Image (cartoon, rainbow, N blue to C red):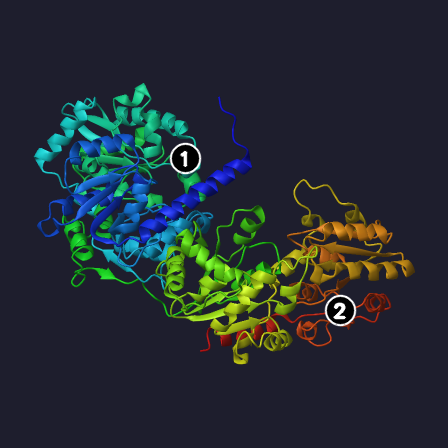
Amino acid sequence: MPLPLPPVAVKIAKRARLALSAERAAFWRSRPVQVDQVLYESFAGNAVGCNPEAIFRNLLDHPDYLHLQHVWVISDRAAIARFEAEFGAHPRVRHVVRGTNAYIAALSTSGYLVNNATFPPSFGKRPGQVYLNTWHGTPLKHMGFDMPDGAHQSANTLRNLLSADYLLAANPFMAETMYEGAYRLRNIYQGRIVEEGYPRIDRQRLTPAQTQQVRRDLSRRGLALGDRRIVLFAPTWRGASFSWPDRDVDALAAQVDALQQALGDEHIVLLKTHQVVHRHAATRPALARVLVPDAIPANVLLGAADALVTDYSSIFFDYLATGRPIAFLTPDATDYQESRGTYLPLDELPGPVGSDPAEVGAALRTLIEDGAKHERYDEWADRFVPFDDGHATERIVDIVFGRHESGYRVRRARTDGRTRLLFHLGGMRANGITTSALNLLSALDPQRYDVTAVMGYAQSPAARANQLRVPAHVRQIFRIGGMNGSKAVQLRRRRNDWRGTPLGPRAAEWHLRLWEDEWTRVLGSGRFDWAADFSGYSPFWANLVLHAPATTHAIWLHNEMVADRNRTVGGRARMHRSLGLVFALYRHYEQLVSVSPSLTELNRVQLAGSAPSVRFRTVRNLPDVERAATGIRLPLSSVLDEGEPRPEWFAELAAGDATWFISVGRLSPEKNHARLIRAFAAVHRQRPDTRLLIVGSGPLEDELRTLIEREGLPDAAFLAGSRSNPYPLLAAADCFVLSSNYEGQPMVLLEAALSDLPIVSTAFASVEDALPPGAIHVVAQDDAALAAGMTAFLDGDVPASHLDAEAYTAAVMAEFAAVADPR
């Protein structure tokens, strides 16, 4: 047995595969789009089915479309065998396997793309391609942003929906609740929503001869139907147990037996499982006599079934078009609604609902024998299958392939008049930029602004924690997958970057196409009235935001940017090249936003060669007032991580016997914590009852720890590390101290003021307007001056600061409106 590869080798191999895939995609994307070729994909290639199959079968023999070539994406071996048996000799039909070079070629060059789920993250729709996403059912269970952690889980789905030219909705409920609501397409989606019924439901309209053929097919596969009525049991999969299909199979076997006993010998219960569960169910002898093979399409089965039992599966919406009875077996209804949730109350479903399969089976038997409908059945049919008259496929084909929208129910996504804002938030690290971004998003009025946050796909624990703090009303779009474009094009781009001369948005056709393709890959047809790179430090994102079409572009300047560019860590100016590239893009931004008036003036002067002076604007940072108010009241122990032993400083701070200075910030050169430690050493020699707590982490942690030892302060000065909730520490301390060389508008000063702490700070360009006048005791940037300021506090000469949060927030919101929404 071969030894497993070490993690680094696995990572290298994965990157190599991704690079090869990207290069193949770039090659095929350079080839012309084949306007007469249609690519179909259903459930990531697991089947030839659903709406794409119905559309394919209609087009294949349609006299107006005999010129079309058809390519099916299939990954399942059994499905490939069935497909080849039926279509292997057809001159205009072939298949490709998902993930192969042939798949990449077909996906990159087909003129029409039809999918009922999602294409992979590398997919970006090209000009000339027409993408129809049919989805795979009207949702009963929560979808998209309505699910727990739905933004993160739905990243690729939202990307696909935004990329589609047409989104198929079986009914208005699906269009409004799922597309426009759960996936937040309202206001920004530029494609078309088609409400003309579901092609797959057409396949349920079987003639008596077709029904008999389905029964014969089932009998040949070992299902002993005889003359018995078919009751199809088609449960969905439980999201929580997806990884444990064996458990589902055990429960399903017991439920089938109980249903069969209740329905009696004149009926036969057949089991239609989710694809993941099917593989396990097929190995159980007890289910062999009732398990429906995947070879028979679900909607054909529905057409042949005399009744349906399901739970939360959207299959029951399709079955409403038959007019035949439905029952709902929901033994885990309470847990399911709490963990996943449903859009419609389960006690209002159009059929008997229960947790006991015997009781549900008995109630369904009564409906079948009486030939009766549930009291809500017609109401639900009118609402959810109003357009399914057997001709939905014809209409969809005419709309998408015939380009005839007039006279059909085809519309744009609804808009509500709000200003559409886009923010790139950065890497979501635990730092001041992330905090200020989250605070601003929380303060924006959702009645006035439709807000979208775009970011990398958060994976680290810290980034995920911050991503989960994004306000619920904010639409989140993640950049997943890699940038398309050949190695030659990427090398050409990077060569310009290495020279320090990045191209502007429209300087060269190849460069424009590269970035417009990436915008389309990440954000599809999304359109915004204003787009901002709030992070402001990444050349990649500064470039991408500049390619947001037909909008105002803004970039945030969180600091003295020239000083930040020249900052060294370990003797290296780590941001010199990257910020130089960002500076070169400033001239293409309409707005350069600094976070305090004095910082705006300083950046305006120092960056005069990078952008016209009139483009420099001011929007101050906002604190999270509610979080601060809550955090201040929390016990001191809440700052500790679960299971963390109490640090040596904790008990002494809790006792309150000493006078504590506190500083919060990243341990990096511009913060100059070394000066703070030296100044505190001078104070401590005179006042041994003083203590210093430095909260934060960063590259200088080891150096600062050594300095504390060298100054003889191991029992008086402490490095507390990063703390996600510093407010109890602020509440327990006596004076806040900042020793920075330069800053933007430090969030920590706002937080200290909300905690009513006295503040001592060194003088930097924006310190005077970081808080209202008189709130900060400002001293010169040297050890002695800072020590004197701390002594002044001990002598009672530095009063507590205060921030009128309501007035301050209103003023900042006015500044923001003047930049993003000058109405």
**Which residue type carries mark 2?**
Thr
Q: Nearer the viewer, mark 2 or mark 1?
A: 2
- Where does label 1 land, which residue? 242
Residue 121 drawn at (x, y percent): 39, 48
At a point 41% along the width and 40% down the height, the residue shown is 336
Horizontal relation, residue 530 to residue 396: left or right: right
In which quarter of the view is residue 812 placed? bottom right
Q: With respect to residue 412, does 143 lie above or below? A: above
Q: Nearer the viewer, residue 153 or 89?
A: 89
Residue 319 drawn at (x, y percent): 22, 41
Q: With respect to residue 31, does 283 lie above or below? A: above
Q: Residue furthest bottom?
A: 614
- Where does label 2 land, which residue? 762
Residue 31 drawn at (x, y percent): 28, 53
Q: Are marks 2 and 1 in contact (CB under 8 Å)?
A: no
Q: Nearer the viewer, residue 575 or 719?
A: 575
Residue 453 makes an appearance in the image? yes
Horizontal relation, residue 802 to residue 282: left or right: right
